[in-house]
Image: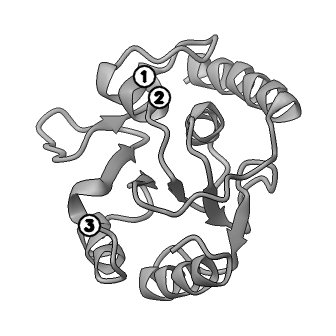
Amino acid sequence: MFYNIIKNFFLKKNVTKRLATQNALASNDKVVTVGILVDESYFSETAQLVERITSQGIEAGNISILVYKDKIKKKEEIKEPFLSLKNISLSGEINKKEVNDFIETPFDLLVNYYDVNKSGLLLLSTKSKAKFKVGFDTVDKRVNHFIIKSLVENYNEFVLELFKYLKILNKI
């Protein structure tokens, strides 16, 4: 427990430093590829979220998901690539290949589907090479290019608002 407190402290420092030097400019490219970063500690309906996004015209093959969980039970099976605080070092290095691949992929849109400031999630969002990042208003404002005021449970409302504004911004 004490180790996790220290780890969170150093990760928060790392995230703060990354946010201070991060380029705030968003891309004007059309959205073709979508990455979704989900905190499954609070939201477990990832399949329905993806289904809702595909109903808006994004192909299912162009959507990648990364799941973050605080604690993973020994016999628990997770279909999508996942990450927990265990997989992140004190310096912010990640030791899972599929997570590093997700971060290095230059998505046209990254959906940060979490509403709690957790240092592991913020680190992943700031490290991502995504061109346009979208998230909730309760998360640090410097992480996302576009912010939607909604609740995590209301994924239908979130997706409708997201695609309404993507059309206005001429990204679809």
Disc sitting over residue 20 in the figure: none
Few, some or many residues within 10 Å of mark 3 (<14, 14–19, 20+):
some
Q: Give the percent coordinates (x, y) of residue 80.
A: 23, 46
Q: Which of these two is toward me, 81 or 70?
A: 81
Look at the picture and state if 31 lies above or below 7. below
Seen in the picture, residue 20 relative to 89 is either above or below; the reply is: below
Please say if the residues under marks 2 and 1 sit with CB atoms less than 8 Å apart.
no
Cα–Cα gap, marks 2 and 1: 20 Å
Q: Quadrant of residue 7?
A: top right
Q: CA distance from mark 3 to mark 2?
A: 20 Å
- Residue at numbered disc 1: 86
- Residue visible at 51% across and 53% down in the picture: 108
Label 3 close to label 2 by CB (< 8 Å): no
First reached walking from the N terminus: tag 3 or tag 1: 3
Farthest residue toward the right?
20
Label 3 residue SS: loop
Which residue does the numbered mark 2 point to in the structure image? 104
Residue drawn at x 48%, y 62% is 31
Q: Amino acid at mark 2?
A: Glu
Q: Quadrant of residue 15?
A: top right
Question: Dot 1: within a 10 Å radius of its alpha carbon, few (fewer than 14), some, or many (20 or more) residues?
Answer: some
Instruction: Tell me the distance, in whole angstroms, between the alpha carbons under discs 3 and 1.
Output: 32 Å
| Residue drawn at the location 16% of the way across and 47% of the way down | 79
The residue pinned by badge 3 equals: 59
> Which sits in the foreground, 2 or 96?
96
- Residue 107, percent from left and from top: 47, 46
User: Which of 107/64 is in front?
Assistant: 107
